[in-house]
Amino acid sequence: MNVADLLSPGVIVGSQELRRLAARVISRAEIQNNAAQQSALADFFVACANAVGGNATKLTATQTVVQNGQTIVVADTTGAAIDGLTATANVAGSALVSAQLSKPVTVGS
């Protein structure tokens, strides 16, 4: 994770140090590729986001934020990616209204 790829946490004392440290920890989690560690790290960041308070949307580890036009990898029920299949998210208001697949898919019976 490159620190430049993370959003700025704003102008708060220690915020840029936090940003650099978060990027370093995320990089290590990506390199180690340990699902349990990645899950624990994600849970930690969710708890951090929820602790901020204010009008921020509360998240759980099973929720995510998808932006309009974002590309999503399509996976089967085991979580395995399906042969290069992606979808483009279509968001209206605060809801995912559809996902347009990158190629035709034949649905078996």
Image (cartoon, rainbow, N blue to C red):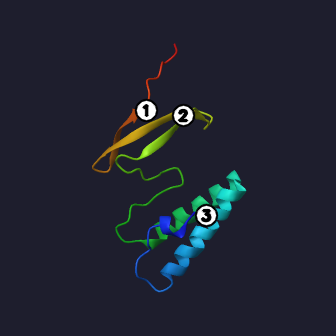
Disc marking residue 1: none
Q: Are marks 2 and 1 in contact (CB under 8 Å)?
A: yes
Work out whether residue 41 or residue 60 is closer to the camera in this orientation and state it. 41
Work out whether residue 13 or residue 56 is closer to the camera in this orientation and state it. 13
Mark 3 vs mark 2, foreground winner is 2
Mark nearer the N terminus (2 vs 1): 2
* Amino acid type, residue under disc 2 in the picture: Gly
Q: Residue 21 sits in which quadrant?
A: bottom right
Residue where numbered disc 3 is placed: 26
Mark nearer the N terminus (3 vs 1): 3
Disc marking residue 102: 1
Cα distance in 3D space between marks 3 and 2: 25 Å
Outermost residue to the bottom: 13
Work out whether residue 41 or residue 52 is closer to the camera in this orientation and state it. 41
Residue 53 in the image: state x and y as whole percent. 41, 71
Residue where numbered disc 2 is placed: 84
- Classify mark 2: helix, strand or loop: strand
